């Protein structure tokens, strides 16, 4: 009985070192894209935003210890970065995106409680 409980605890334990290493490698790749590529090439713009999203996802998942919160915050920040890229990212859009993120977090919390 005790051995089975110990085995379940070990399986539920999160291993942060691979996530931390992957986050660091994604950060290095973002820096390389920013400094060593030509911004006029259309290939690197979607690649930048995809790497930016994945980097933020791993970073905030490690910080908050929750994949759901990390995903939601990284989606909000990536959407705002895309808005800034197209020139429509202002404080009003940032407040609206943050409000939608807070509403989504609260909705997830409330529906989780009612189950």
Image: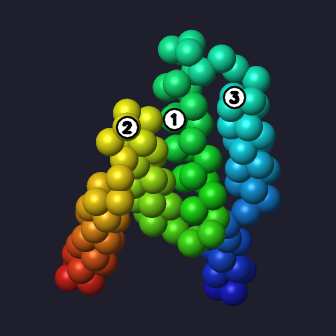
Furthest-bottom residue in this view:
2
Of badges 2 and 3, the one in the foreground is: 2
Disc 2 is placed on an element classified as: loop
> Is the Cβ of the residue at disc 3 closer than 8 Å to that at disc 1?
no
Q: Is residue 115 above or below residue 31?
A: below
Q: Is residue 25 visible?
A: yes
Instruction: Judge from the rendering whether residue 13 lies leftward or rightward of residue 68; answer left or right.
Output: right
Name the quadrant containing residue 26.
top right
* Lateral position of residue 101 relative to residue 6, left or right: left
Quadrant of the frame with the C terminus: bottom left
Viewer-side residue, 62 vs 43? 43
The secondary structure type at the circle numbered 1 is helix
Quarter occupied by residue 31: top right
Mark 2 lies on residue: 87
Q: Which residue is drawn at 77% across and 40% down?
A: 28
Mark closer to the chain start, 2 or 3: 3
**Counting other residues with Cα less than 10 Å from the Cα at mark 3, is it few (<14), some (14-19), or many (20 or more)?**
some
Is residue 97 visible in this depiction of the protein?
Answer: no
Give the alpha-carbon distance from disc 3 to disc 1, as whole Å.
Answer: 11 Å
Residue 93 horizontal side relative to residue 53, left or right: left
Which numbered disc, 2 or 1, marks the residue closer to the eye? 2
The mark nearer the N terminus, 2 or 1, is: 1
Residue 22: image location, x then y, percent: 73, 46
Q: Mark 1 points at which residue?
A: 49
Residue annotated with mark 3: 33
Q: How crowded is mark 1: few (under 14 residues within 10 Å), some or many (20 or more)?
A: some
Left/right of residue 114 with respect to residue 59 in the rendered view: left
* Picture quarter with the N terminus: bottom right
Q: How many numbered marks are there?
A: 3
């Amino acid at each position: 009985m005790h051995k089975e409980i110990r085995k379940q605890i070990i399986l539920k334990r999160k291993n942060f070192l691979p996530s931390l290493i992957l986050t660091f490698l994604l950060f290095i790749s973002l820096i390389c894209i920013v400094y060593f590529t030509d911004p006029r090439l259309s290939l690197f713009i979607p690649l930048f935003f995809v790497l930016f999203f994945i980097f933020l996802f791993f970073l905030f998942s490690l910080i908050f210890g929750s994949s759901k919160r990390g995903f939601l915050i990284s989606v909000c920040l990536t959407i705002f970065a895309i808005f800034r890229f197209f020139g429509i990212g202002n404080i009003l859009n940032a407040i609206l995106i943050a409000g939608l993120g807070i509403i989504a977090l609260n909705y997830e919390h409330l529906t989780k409680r009612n189950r």
